[in-house]
Protein backbone atom coordinates (compact mmCIF):
# COMPACT_ATOMS: atom_id res chain seq x y z
CA UNK A 1 0.00 0.00 0.00
CA UNK A 2 1.23 3.48 -0.87
CA UNK A 3 0.36 6.75 0.81
CA UNK A 4 1.83 10.23 0.46
CA UNK A 5 5.10 10.69 2.32
CA UNK A 6 4.63 12.52 5.65
CA UNK A 7 5.58 16.14 5.93
CA UNK A 8 9.12 16.62 7.27
CA UNK A 9 9.28 16.83 11.05
CA UNK A 10 5.91 15.26 11.85
CA UNK A 11 4.78 11.81 12.92
CA UNK A 12 3.07 9.31 10.68
CA UNK A 13 -0.47 8.83 12.04
CA UNK A 14 -3.21 6.23 11.74
CA UNK A 15 -6.59 7.21 13.19
CA UNK A 16 -8.57 4.07 14.00
CA UNK A 17 -11.73 5.75 15.33
CA UNK A 18 -13.16 7.84 12.49
CA UNK A 19 -16.81 7.68 11.45
CA UNK A 20 -18.58 8.07 8.13
CA UNK A 21 -22.18 8.10 6.92
CA UNK A 22 -22.74 7.26 3.26
CA UNK A 23 -25.18 9.23 1.11
CA UNK A 24 -28.08 6.88 1.72
CA UNK A 25 -31.43 8.35 0.72
CA UNK A 26 -34.68 7.88 2.61
CA UNK A 27 -35.88 5.63 -0.19
CA UNK A 28 -32.76 3.47 0.05
CA UNK A 29 -33.17 3.23 3.83
CA UNK A 30 -36.51 1.49 3.38
CA UNK A 31 -34.68 -1.80 2.89
CA UNK A 32 -34.74 -1.99 6.71
CA UNK A 33 -38.54 -1.93 6.81
CA UNK A 34 -38.71 0.23 9.97
CA UNK A 35 -40.23 3.69 10.47
CA UNK A 36 -37.11 5.33 11.92
CA UNK A 37 -34.58 3.94 9.43
CA UNK A 38 -31.46 6.15 9.26
CA UNK A 39 -30.61 8.13 6.14
CA UNK A 40 -28.69 11.26 5.18
CA UNK A 41 -30.29 14.51 4.10
CA UNK A 42 -27.64 16.53 2.26
CA UNK A 43 -28.67 20.20 2.42
CA UNK A 44 -25.74 21.59 0.41
CA UNK A 45 -22.08 20.78 -0.27
CA UNK A 46 -21.12 21.71 3.31
CA UNK A 47 -23.86 20.62 5.69
CA UNK A 48 -26.41 17.88 6.08
CA UNK A 49 -28.62 16.14 8.63
CA UNK A 50 -28.66 12.54 9.82
CA UNK A 51 -32.31 11.54 9.80
CA UNK A 52 -34.21 8.80 11.62
CA UNK A 53 -37.23 8.32 9.44
CA UNK A 54 -38.85 11.75 9.26
CA UNK A 55 -37.10 13.04 12.39
CA UNK A 56 -33.88 15.05 12.50
CA UNK A 57 -31.23 13.22 14.50
CA UNK A 58 -27.95 15.17 14.21
CA UNK A 59 -26.57 18.00 12.05
CA UNK A 60 -23.35 17.00 10.26
CA UNK A 61 -20.75 18.41 7.91
CA UNK A 62 -19.40 17.30 4.54
CA UNK A 63 -16.37 15.26 5.69
CA UNK A 64 -18.79 12.72 7.15
CA UNK A 65 -19.89 11.65 3.65
CA UNK A 66 -17.60 13.43 1.18
CA UNK A 67 -14.21 11.70 0.80
CA UNK A 68 -12.53 14.75 -0.77
CA UNK A 69 -13.57 16.97 2.15
CA UNK A 70 -12.37 14.25 4.53
CA UNK A 71 -9.00 13.94 2.80
CA UNK A 72 -8.52 17.71 2.93
CA UNK A 73 -9.03 17.67 6.70
CA UNK A 74 -6.75 14.65 7.06
CA UNK A 75 -4.04 16.57 5.21
CA UNK A 76 -4.57 19.62 7.41
CA UNK A 77 -4.21 17.47 10.53
CA UNK A 78 -1.34 15.35 9.25
CA UNK A 79 -3.35 12.11 9.38
CA UNK A 80 -1.98 9.60 6.88
CA UNK A 81 -4.54 6.80 7.23
CA UNK A 82 -8.04 6.58 8.67
CA UNK A 83 -9.66 3.29 9.56
CA UNK A 84 -13.25 4.40 8.98
CA UNK A 85 -16.37 2.96 10.58
CA UNK A 86 -20.06 3.63 10.18
CA UNK A 87 -21.86 6.04 12.48
CA UNK A 88 -23.41 3.71 15.10
CA UNK A 89 -27.00 4.69 14.25
CA UNK A 90 -26.40 2.62 11.09
CA UNK A 91 -25.90 -0.63 13.07
CA UNK A 92 -29.64 -1.43 12.99
CA UNK A 93 -29.60 -4.52 15.21
CA UNK A 94 -33.39 -4.61 15.17
CA UNK A 95 -35.96 -5.92 12.77
CA UNK A 96 -35.95 -8.69 10.25
CA UNK A 97 -32.53 -10.42 9.93
CA UNK A 98 -32.84 -10.74 6.16
CA UNK A 99 -33.52 -7.04 5.75
CA UNK A 100 -30.73 -6.20 8.22
CA UNK A 101 -28.32 -8.34 6.20
CA UNK A 102 -29.18 -6.52 2.98
CA UNK A 103 -28.81 -3.23 4.84
CA UNK A 104 -25.36 -4.16 6.19
CA UNK A 105 -24.21 -5.16 2.71
CA UNK A 106 -25.53 -1.86 1.33
CA UNK A 107 -23.65 0.17 3.95
CA UNK A 108 -20.50 -1.91 3.49
CA UNK A 109 -20.52 -1.53 -0.27
CA UNK A 110 -21.06 2.23 0.11
CA UNK A 111 -18.05 2.34 2.45
CA UNK A 112 -15.86 0.67 -0.15
CA UNK A 113 -17.11 3.10 -2.78
CA UNK A 114 -16.30 6.09 -0.57
CA UNK A 115 -12.85 4.76 0.34
CA UNK A 116 -12.04 4.11 -3.31
CA UNK A 117 -11.36 7.84 -3.60
CA UNK A 118 -8.07 7.14 -1.79
CA UNK A 119 -7.93 3.45 -1.01
CA UNK A 120 -4.42 3.67 0.43
CA UNK A 121 -5.51 6.23 3.03
CA UNK A 122 -9.15 5.35 3.78
CA UNK A 123 -9.52 1.79 5.08
CA UNK A 124 -13.08 0.68 5.93
CA UNK A 125 -14.49 -1.46 8.70
CA UNK A 126 -17.67 -3.34 7.86
CA UNK A 127 -20.81 -3.77 9.92
CA UNK A 128 -22.89 -6.93 10.32
CA UNK A 129 -26.44 -7.98 11.32
CA UNK A 130 -25.62 -9.14 14.83
CA UNK A 131 -29.22 -10.16 15.55
CA UNK A 132 -28.48 -13.23 13.39
CA UNK A 133 -25.03 -14.67 14.02
CA UNK A 134 -24.93 -16.98 10.99
CA UNK A 135 -25.74 -14.03 8.72
CA UNK A 136 -23.27 -11.84 10.59
CA UNK A 137 -20.47 -14.36 10.09
CA UNK A 138 -21.28 -14.66 6.40
CA UNK A 139 -21.35 -10.89 5.88
CA UNK A 140 -18.10 -10.20 7.73
CA UNK A 141 -16.37 -12.87 5.63
CA UNK A 142 -17.81 -11.38 2.43
CA UNK A 143 -16.93 -7.81 3.37
CA UNK A 144 -13.34 -8.56 4.35
CA UNK A 145 -12.83 -10.46 1.12
CA UNK A 146 -14.13 -7.36 -0.70
CA UNK A 147 -11.62 -5.04 0.98
CA UNK A 148 -12.68 -4.18 4.53
CA UNK A 149 -9.86 -4.39 7.11
CA UNK A 150 -12.03 -5.46 10.03
CA UNK A 151 -15.48 -5.19 11.59
CA UNK A 152 -17.13 -2.49 13.72
CA UNK A 153 -19.75 -3.71 16.22
CA UNK A 154 -21.84 -2.33 19.04
CA UNK A 155 -21.17 -3.39 22.60
CA UNK A 156 -24.53 -5.13 23.10
CA UNK A 157 -27.41 -6.47 21.04
CA UNK A 158 -31.02 -6.63 22.25
CA UNK A 159 -30.04 -6.86 25.90
CA UNK A 160 -27.23 -9.35 25.28
CA UNK A 161 -23.72 -8.41 26.39
CA UNK A 162 -20.63 -9.59 24.54
CA UNK A 163 -20.40 -12.72 26.71
CA UNK A 164 -23.66 -14.07 25.27
CA UNK A 165 -23.00 -17.38 23.47
CA UNK A 166 -24.18 -15.99 20.12
CA UNK A 167 -21.88 -12.97 20.29
CA UNK A 168 -19.00 -15.13 21.47
CA UNK A 169 -19.58 -17.34 18.43
CA UNK A 170 -19.22 -14.27 16.22
CA UNK A 171 -16.01 -13.17 17.99
CA UNK A 172 -14.66 -16.72 17.65
CA UNK A 173 -15.40 -16.59 13.91
CA UNK A 174 -13.49 -13.30 13.63
CA UNK A 175 -10.54 -14.78 15.52
CA UNK A 176 -10.50 -17.87 13.31
CA UNK A 177 -10.42 -15.70 10.19
CA UNK A 178 -7.96 -13.13 11.58
CA UNK A 179 -10.51 -10.30 11.40
CA UNK A 180 -9.90 -7.37 13.79
CA UNK A 181 -12.89 -6.12 15.81
CA UNK A 182 -13.56 -2.54 16.96
CA UNK A 183 -16.26 -2.29 19.66
CA UNK A 184 -18.20 0.97 19.96
CA UNK A 185 -20.86 1.84 22.57
CA UNK A 186 -24.37 2.52 21.33
CA UNK A 187 -27.99 2.61 22.57
CA UNK A 188 -26.90 3.74 26.03
CA UNK A 189 -28.37 2.45 29.28
CA UNK A 190 -30.79 4.54 31.37
CA UNK A 191 -31.45 7.04 28.59
CA UNK A 192 -34.53 8.27 30.44
CA UNK A 193 -32.26 9.49 33.26
CA UNK A 194 -29.86 11.28 30.93
CA UNK A 195 -32.01 13.42 28.64
CA UNK A 196 -29.85 16.57 28.80
CA UNK A 197 -26.27 17.86 28.77
CA UNK A 198 -25.10 15.03 26.47
CA UNK A 199 -25.05 12.77 29.52
CA UNK A 200 -25.71 9.73 27.34
CA UNK A 201 -22.34 10.44 25.72
CA UNK A 202 -20.52 11.64 28.85
CA UNK A 203 -21.81 9.00 31.29
CA UNK A 204 -23.55 6.34 29.22
CA UNK A 205 -20.82 5.67 26.66
CA UNK A 206 -17.99 5.13 29.19
CA UNK A 207 -20.25 2.94 31.31
CA UNK A 208 -21.35 0.84 28.32
CA UNK A 209 -17.74 0.26 27.29
CA UNK A 210 -16.70 -0.67 30.82
CA UNK A 211 -19.61 -3.12 30.95
CA UNK A 212 -18.58 -4.66 27.61
CA UNK A 213 -15.02 -5.28 28.78
CA UNK A 214 -16.05 -6.68 32.16
CA UNK A 215 -18.63 -8.94 30.53
CA UNK A 216 -15.80 -10.67 28.68
CA UNK A 217 -13.45 -10.78 31.68
CA UNK A 218 -15.71 -11.77 34.58
CA UNK A 219 -17.74 -14.31 32.58
CA UNK A 220 -14.57 -16.20 31.70
CA UNK A 221 -15.23 -15.51 28.02
CA UNK A 222 -11.60 -14.64 27.35
CA UNK A 223 -10.73 -18.13 28.56
CA UNK A 224 -12.96 -19.58 25.84
CA UNK A 225 -12.00 -17.24 23.00
CA UNK A 226 -8.85 -17.75 20.93
CA UNK A 227 -5.87 -15.88 22.34
CA UNK A 228 -5.18 -14.32 18.96
CA UNK A 229 -8.54 -12.51 18.77
CA UNK A 230 -7.87 -8.85 17.93
CA UNK A 231 -10.45 -6.74 19.77
CA UNK A 232 -10.24 -3.03 20.52
CA UNK A 233 -12.62 -0.89 22.58
CA UNK A 234 -13.32 2.74 21.68
CA UNK A 235 -13.15 5.82 23.93
CA UNK A 236 -10.12 4.64 25.85
CA UNK A 237 -11.98 1.59 27.11
CA UNK A 238 -14.48 3.79 28.92
CA UNK A 239 -14.15 3.57 32.71
CA UNK A 240 -12.19 0.32 32.72
CA UNK A 241 -8.67 1.56 33.48
CA UNK A 242 -9.80 3.96 36.21
CA UNK A 243 -11.95 1.28 37.88
CA UNK A 244 -9.60 -1.68 37.50
CA UNK A 245 -8.43 -1.41 41.11
CA UNK A 246 -12.01 -1.61 42.35
CA UNK A 247 -12.74 -4.63 40.14
CA UNK A 248 -9.52 -6.33 41.21
CA UNK A 249 -10.36 -5.78 44.88
CA UNK A 250 -13.84 -7.22 44.36
CA UNK A 251 -12.41 -10.29 42.59
CA UNK A 252 -10.09 -11.06 45.52
CA UNK A 253 -12.73 -10.48 48.21
CA UNK A 254 -16.00 -11.78 46.77
CA UNK A 255 -16.54 -15.25 45.36
CA UNK A 256 -19.60 -14.08 43.40
CA UNK A 257 -17.26 -11.85 41.37
CA UNK A 258 -14.66 -14.52 40.64
CA UNK A 259 -17.02 -17.51 40.27
CA UNK A 260 -16.59 -17.63 36.47
CA UNK A 261 -13.28 -15.78 36.20
CA UNK A 262 -10.31 -17.98 37.13
CA UNK A 263 -7.67 -15.25 37.10
CA UNK A 264 -7.49 -11.70 38.50
CA UNK A 265 -9.03 -9.20 36.06
CA UNK A 266 -5.72 -7.41 35.56
CA UNK A 267 -4.30 -10.55 33.94
CA UNK A 268 -6.70 -10.16 30.99
CA UNK A 269 -5.41 -6.76 29.92
CA UNK A 270 -3.17 -8.49 27.39
CA UNK A 271 -6.28 -9.81 25.60
CA UNK A 272 -7.59 -6.49 24.23
CA UNK A 273 -6.67 -2.99 23.11
CA UNK A 274 -8.26 0.45 23.49
CA UNK A 275 -8.10 3.68 21.54
CA UNK A 276 -6.54 6.91 22.80
CA UNK A 277 -9.69 9.09 22.74
CA UNK A 278 -9.46 10.42 26.30
CA UNK A 279 -8.52 14.03 25.35
CA UNK A 280 -6.07 14.70 28.18
CA UNK A 281 -2.40 13.80 28.33
CA UNK A 282 -2.29 12.87 32.03
CA UNK A 283 -5.28 10.57 31.53
CA UNK A 284 -3.66 9.03 28.47
CA UNK A 285 -0.40 8.55 30.37
CA UNK A 286 -2.35 6.66 33.06
CA UNK A 287 -4.13 4.60 30.39
CA UNK A 288 -0.80 3.64 28.84
CA UNK A 289 0.55 2.65 32.26
CA UNK A 290 -2.46 0.39 32.87
CA UNK A 291 -2.86 -1.10 29.41
CA UNK A 292 0.74 -1.18 28.25
CA UNK A 293 2.11 0.89 25.41
CA UNK A 294 1.45 -1.73 22.73
CA UNK A 295 -2.30 -1.83 23.42
CA UNK A 296 -3.34 1.81 22.93
CA UNK A 297 -4.15 2.91 19.36
CA UNK A 298 -4.66 6.50 18.27
CA UNK A 299 -8.36 7.26 17.82
CA UNK A 300 -10.07 10.62 17.53
CA UNK A 301 -13.85 10.01 17.15
CA UNK A 302 -13.63 12.13 13.99
CA UNK A 303 -15.57 14.07 12.71
CA UNK A 304 -18.06 14.58 15.55
CA UNK A 305 -18.15 17.50 18.04
CA UNK A 306 -16.94 15.38 20.96
CA UNK A 307 -14.03 14.09 18.90
CA UNK A 308 -10.46 15.33 18.95
CA UNK A 309 -10.26 18.60 17.00
CA UNK A 310 -6.72 17.95 15.78
CA UNK A 311 -6.22 14.16 15.82
CA UNK A 312 -2.93 13.15 17.43
CA UNK A 313 -1.81 16.69 18.25
CA UNK A 314 -1.96 16.19 22.01
CA UNK A 315 0.15 13.04 21.74
CA UNK A 316 2.68 14.77 19.51
CA UNK A 317 3.07 17.83 21.76
CA UNK A 318 2.81 16.46 25.31
CA UNK A 319 6.00 16.13 27.34
CA UNK A 320 4.61 13.02 29.04
CA UNK A 321 5.40 10.70 26.14
CA UNK A 322 8.72 9.52 24.76
CA UNK A 323 9.38 9.42 21.04
CA UNK A 324 9.02 5.63 21.18
CA UNK A 325 5.62 5.95 22.86
CA UNK A 326 4.44 8.45 20.27
CA UNK A 327 5.54 6.14 17.47
CA UNK A 328 3.70 3.21 19.02
CA UNK A 329 0.42 5.01 19.73
CA UNK A 330 0.27 7.14 16.61
CA UNK A 331 1.24 4.44 14.15
CA UNK A 332 2.81 1.10 15.07
CA UNK A 333 0.02 -0.34 17.22
CA UNK A 334 -2.66 0.39 14.63
CA UNK A 335 -0.51 -0.87 11.76
CA UNK A 336 0.00 -4.15 13.61
CA UNK A 337 -3.62 -4.48 14.74
CA UNK A 338 -5.29 -3.79 11.39
CA UNK A 339 -2.49 -4.87 9.07
CA UNK A 340 -2.20 -1.46 7.40
CA UNK A 341 1.03 0.36 6.70
CA UNK A 342 2.27 3.70 5.37
CA UNK A 343 4.74 2.42 2.78
Image (cartoon, helix red, strand yellow):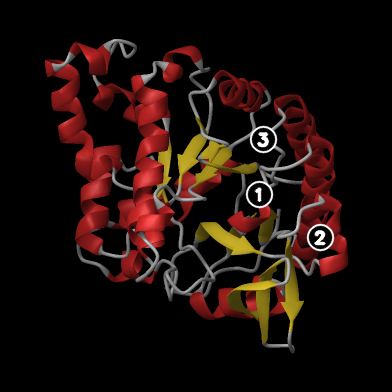
Q: Residues within 10 Å of mark 2 (few under 14, many from 20)?
A: many
Image quarter of the C terminus? bottom right
Residue 314, horizontal then vertical, whole percent: 32, 69
Q: Nearer the viewer, residue 79 or 299?
A: 299
Question: What secondary structure is found at the residue carrying circle 3?
Answer: loop
Residue 235, horizontal then vertical, whole percent: 40, 53
Question: What secondary structure is found at the residue carrying circle 1?
Answer: loop
Compared to 326, does 228 lie above or below? above
Give how far apart the Cα atoms at labels 1 and 3 are: 9 Å
Answer with the quarter of the image where residue 307 lies. bottom left
Residue placed at 75% from the left, 39% from the top? 144
Name the residue tied to disc 1: 91
Compared to 160, does 252 lie above or below? above
Q: Residues within 10 Å of mark 1 (few under 14, many from 20)?
A: many
Compared to 143, does 107 lie above or below? below
Q: Earlier in the sequence, mark 2 or mark 1?
A: 2
Name the residue tied to disc 3: 130
Residue placed at 82% from the left, 68% from the top? 26
**Residue 327 visible in the displayed image:** no
Q: Residues within 10 Å of mark 3 (few under 14, many from 20)?
A: many
Find out whether the residues at labels 1 and 3 contact each other: C-beta distance under 8 Å: yes
Amino acid sequence: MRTPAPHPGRSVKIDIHAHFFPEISQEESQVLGIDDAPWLRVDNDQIGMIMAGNNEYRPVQAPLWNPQARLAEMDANGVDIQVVSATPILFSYVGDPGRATRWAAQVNDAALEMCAAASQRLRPLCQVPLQDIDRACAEVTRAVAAGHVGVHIGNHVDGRNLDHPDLLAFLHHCADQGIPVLVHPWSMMAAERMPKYMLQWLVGMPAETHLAILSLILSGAFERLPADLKICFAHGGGNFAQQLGRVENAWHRRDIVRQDCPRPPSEYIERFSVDSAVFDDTTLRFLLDVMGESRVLMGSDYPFPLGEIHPGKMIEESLLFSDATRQAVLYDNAANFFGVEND
